[in-house]
Image (spheres, helix red, strand yellow):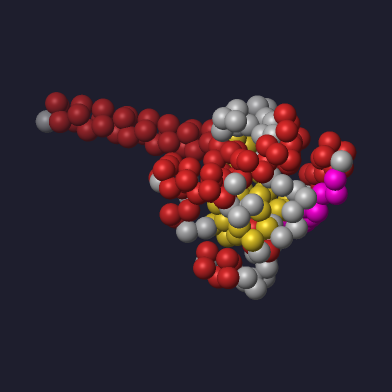
Amino acid sequence: MQRTARTVTASLVVAIALVAGSFALKGALAQQDETLATAIFAGGCFWCVESDFDAIPGVVATVSGYTGGISPNPTYKQVTAGGTGHYEAVRITYDPSKVSYDHLLTAFWRSVDPTDGGGQFCDRGQSYETAIFVDGAEQRKAAEDSKAKAEKDLGKSVVTPIKDAVPFFDAEDYHQDFYKKSPLRYKYYRWNCGRNQRVKQLWGDMAYKGIPQH
């Protein structure tokens, strides 16, 4: 009986410690989450945007999805068919202590063709057009300043709109991290669509600035 009581007591101590540790971990994660920030960019095919931004140190997570339209819970088929008003976009969660919003903006501009108002590369239609979705006055000011700089660097008019952030709907699971799940198909699509070729033609030495994998 004494041995059993000791075992029970020890088990209770362990259980209490585990619960306390669990709450401490959740608290730490919650505190960490409060230090993170979000950017939302539409840059044509979200497979490619996700791949590019995942390569940037300080980016914690990327999610492919749909935003900017009026249809709730849209599907890929609905968005690409047109009429929903949604863009293919990527929600980027990042650590501002490691990478700035300005850095992400620079990487965005130099990984797309912001002079194309009809889509991106081989993908045509409104859902593939570029856009920046901002959360608040600070992000809007930074986005507007970076757009002006992009126009100056290119010497051409930039048609990418800067819009207020609206509800973001996650894309279907098979779209998330597609470049990791189907690397051969992804690489074939990206090359065949002419994305890298056009970005480098447009931006020259400034192409993919701030994105290490390029």
Quarter of the N terminus within the rendering? top left
Q: Is residue 34 magenta?
A: no
Residue placed most toward the observer, 208 or 37? 208
Instruction: Please tell me which residue is depicted at 49% across the width and 38% down the height of the picture.
Output: 26
**Residue 144 in sight from this viewpoint:** no
Residue 9 appears left or right of 138: left
Quarter of the C terminus within the rendering? top right
Decide: is 102 above or below 159: above
Decide: is 73 above or below 186: below
- Report the number of discs: 0
Question: Residue 34: which quarter of the image?
Answer: top right
**Residue 212 in sight from this viewpoint:** yes
> Magenta span covers which residues?
156-166
Return the x and y of residue 110 as percentages of the image width and height. Answer: 71, 38
Looking at the image, the residue that sits furthest to the left is: 1
Instruction: Please tell me which residue is depicted at 61% across the width and 57% down the height of the picture.
Output: 123
Residue placed most toward the observer, 21 or 115? 115
Instruction: Please tell me which residue is depicted at 31% across the width and 30% down the height of the picture.
Output: 14
Question: Residue 7: which quarter of the image?
Answer: top left
Return the x and y of residue 21 as percentages of the image width and height. Answer: 43, 31
Residue 47 appears left or right of 105: left
Instruction: Please tell me which residue is depicted at 26% across the width and 32% down the height of the picture.
Output: 11
Return the x and y of residue 173 as percentages of the image width and height. Answer: 44, 55
